[in-house]
């Protein structure tokens, strides 16, 4: 199905609209409506605050008219603090900088239209880091396959929080 979304808006740390945080929380609540009794999903506002407060934070939001239908966001990881390296994955020797894709999320009514790919590509288009990394819940193999079709490879698994799912750590080369 072809996407009806043509309006992608870019946001960055230090230049966020007043309603930005609540908009992300509302999209998340719709996207995970069936899982909002899970304490991990209930802490999403904390993750929004954490990521949007990071230097280099960037976000792309897809709109259908004035309705936000999905978003992707992330930030560069500080050198020496690349949490994914504990997987044992070894990038090329001269690859140092990593951009972490924290969220790619589309509301249910707009899924299966290629919007997540549009968001992901727009988020990473101007990145200058060597690698991008993201996490995929291991109980969602189709999502992992989707990211593999976009060039990611599984580097290992991690459970970053005691109440979080176990995630596949996915890495891709941004140098092309």
Image (spheres, rainbow, N blue to C red):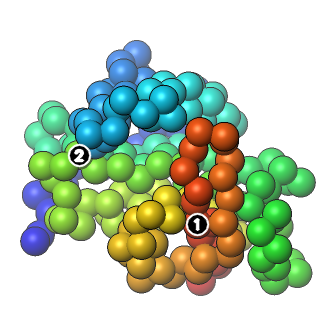
Going from N to C along the chain, the mark reached first, 2 or 1, is 2
Report the number of discs: 2
Measured along the vertical axis of the image, is residue 164 above or below residue 17?
A: below
- Secondary structure, mark 1, is strand
82 sits left or right of 118 in the view: right
- Secondary structure, mark 2, is loop
Quick check: marks 2 and 1 in contact, CB under 8 Å? no
Q: Quadrant of the N terminus?
A: bottom left
Q: Quadrant of the C terminus?
A: bottom right
Q: Which residue is disc 2 drawn over?
A: 107
118 sits left or right of 157 in the view: left
Q: Residue at x 66, y 66 (%)?
A: 157
Q: Which residue is disc 1 drawn over?
A: 168
Classify 10 Å Cα crowding around label 1: few (below 14), some (14-19), many (20 and above): many
Classify 10 Å Cα crowding around label 2: few (below 14), some (14-19), many (20 and above): many
Q: Residue at x 66, y 52 (%)?
A: 159
Residue 9, x across and y down, in percent: 33, 43
Residue 39, x across and y down, in percent: 48, 29
């Amino acid at each position: 199905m072809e996407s009806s979304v043509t309006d992608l808006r870019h946001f960055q740390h230090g230049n966020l609209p007043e309603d930005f945080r609540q908009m992300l929380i509302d999209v998340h609540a719709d996207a995970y409506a069936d899982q909002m009794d899970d304490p991990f999903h209930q802490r999403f506002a904390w993750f929004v605050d954490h990521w949007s407060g990071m230097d280099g934070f960037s976000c792309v939001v897809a709109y259908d008219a004035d309705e936000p239908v999905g978003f992707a966001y992330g930030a560069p990881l500080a050198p020496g603090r690349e949490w994914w390296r504990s997987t044992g994955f070894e990038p090329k020797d001269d690859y140092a900088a990593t951009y972490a894709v924290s969220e790619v999320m589309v509301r249910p009514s707009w899924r299966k239209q290629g919007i997540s790919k549009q968001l992901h590509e727009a988020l990473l288009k101007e990145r200058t880091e060597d690698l991008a990394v993201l996490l995929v819940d291991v109980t969602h193999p189709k999502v992992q396959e989707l990211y593999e079709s976009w060039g990611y490879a599984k580097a290992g698994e991690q459970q970053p929080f005691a109440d979080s799912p176990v995630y596949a750590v996915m890495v891709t080369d941004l140098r092309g």
